[in-house]
Image (cartoon, coloured by chain):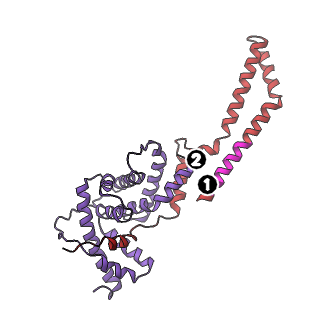
Chain colours: A red, B purple
């Protein structure tokens, strides 16, 4: 019985692994992005919803609070308070700044993703 | 799992996962599809990986399972019980391969391995290329360690025979 030359075997097996096609990375990325499991990759495209939601909630809370302070249950007070806040530039500045920040983040993530491909 | 971490895993394991899939499916398009499914699964399931085994073992196990699911119903395994109880010296094969260019070496070894059933060729690759232990291969293939040893032994014989056949045919005078 011949003894097996492990080193020769190893050197032969060095050629046993095939190179994966370049398209594999693209296919995997696309599949992950399209998957509906709320993956991190997918959410980067819709992340602007977060500051929008936060700002709208904040506006509603402020308006409600203002109504409660000025007169409980008066719809016109609520409306006035809401309009007052809508015409106030501060929430819009916050919303705009947040939006730009997240848009930049989304853009940079996508650029980085393309560069690492 | 973040994208950077996933990219690192993808870069490290893409060739091995694709090769495992190719050995089972025997078709490049099918192997690409299986490899894609394996990596999507890795991306979604990575947080559930508890680190009880090596990452490589976990990934190769997914690759083997996914490949087996893909070829379900196809018969690939042949239990060669009548093979001679002899190990073959690969130094002659190696010296012939040395006379060929890199591309041909890759092509001939790949062709020979594709002629061997995946139940033998995959353990051979994991053991000799990726240095996995017999126990780790047993975990990947979901068989006992003694069965892995038998498959490595028979796999060596089968690969040697296939390579000898191919190299004789392709190079004519190099192997006599």
The residue stretch that appears in magenta: A100-114
**Where residue B14 sits: x, y (%)?**
47, 60
Compared with A55, B104 (above or below) is: below
Describe residue B165's horizontal placement relative to residue A72 as left or right.
left
**Where residue B59 sits: x, y (%)?**
41, 53
Q: Between disc 1 and disc 2, whose residue precedes?
A: 2
Quadrant location of the N terminus of chain A in the rendered image: bottom left
- Identify the residue at the far bottom of this view: B173
Q: Main secondary structure of the magenta part?
A: helix
Describe residue A61's horizontal placement relative to residue B173 as left or right.
right
Rounded to the nearest whole Å, what is the CA distance between mark 1 and mark 2?
10 Å
Describe residue A107's horizontal placement relative to residue B13 as left or right.
right
Compared with A67, B72 (above or below) is: below
Secondary structure at numbered mark 1: helix
Query: Chain ID for label 2?
Result: A
Query: Chain ID for label 1?
Result: A
In depth, the one of B135 and A115 nearer the eye is: B135
Q: Are marks 1 and 2 on the same chain?
A: yes
Image disc number at residue A113? 1
**Where residue B17 sits: x, y (%)?**
42, 59
In the image, what residue occupies the spot 77% across and 38% down?
A96
Secondary structure at numbered mark 2: helix
**Where residue B6 sits: x, y (%)?**
52, 51
Look at the numbered discs 1 and 2 and tell me whether their residues touch, using CB distance below 8 Å. Answer: yes
């Amino acid at each position: 019985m011949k003894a097996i030359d492990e080193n020769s075997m190893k050197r032969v097996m060095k050629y046993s692994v095939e190179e994966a096609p370049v398209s594999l990375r693209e296919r995997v990325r696309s599949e992950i992005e399209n998957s509906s499991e709320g993956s991190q990759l997918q959410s980067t495209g819709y992340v602007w919803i977060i500051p929008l939601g936060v700002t709208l909630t904040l506006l509603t809370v402020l308006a409600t609070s203002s109504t409660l302070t000025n007169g409980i249950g008066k719809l016109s007070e609520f409306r006035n308070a809401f309009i007052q806040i809508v015409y106030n530039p501060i929430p819009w500045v916050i919303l705009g700044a947040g939006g730009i920040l997240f848009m930049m983040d989304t853009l940079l993530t996508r650029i980085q993703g393309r560069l690492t491909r | 799992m973040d994208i950077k971490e996933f990219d690192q895993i993808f870069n490290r394991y893409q060739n091995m996962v694709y090769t495992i899939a190719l050995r089972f499916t025997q078709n490049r398009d099918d192997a690409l599809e299986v490899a894609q499914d394996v990596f999507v699964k890795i991306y979604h399931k990575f947080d559930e990986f508890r680190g009880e085994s090596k990452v490589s073992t976990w990934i190769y196990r997914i690759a083997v399972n996914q490949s087996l699911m893909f070829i379900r119903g196809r018969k690939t395994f042949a239990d060669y019980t009548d093979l001679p109880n002899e190990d073959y010296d690969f130094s002659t094969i190696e010296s012939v391969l040395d006379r060929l260019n890199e591309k041909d070496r890759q092509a001939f070894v790949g062709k020979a391995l594709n002629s061997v059933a995946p139940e033998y060729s995959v353990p051979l690759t994991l053991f000799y290329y990726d240095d996995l232990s017999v126990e780790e291969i047993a975990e990947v293939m979901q068989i006992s360690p003694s069965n892995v040893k038998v498959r490595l032994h028979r796999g060596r014989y089968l690969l040697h025979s296939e390579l000898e056949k191919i190299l004789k045919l392709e190079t004519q005078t190099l192997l006599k």
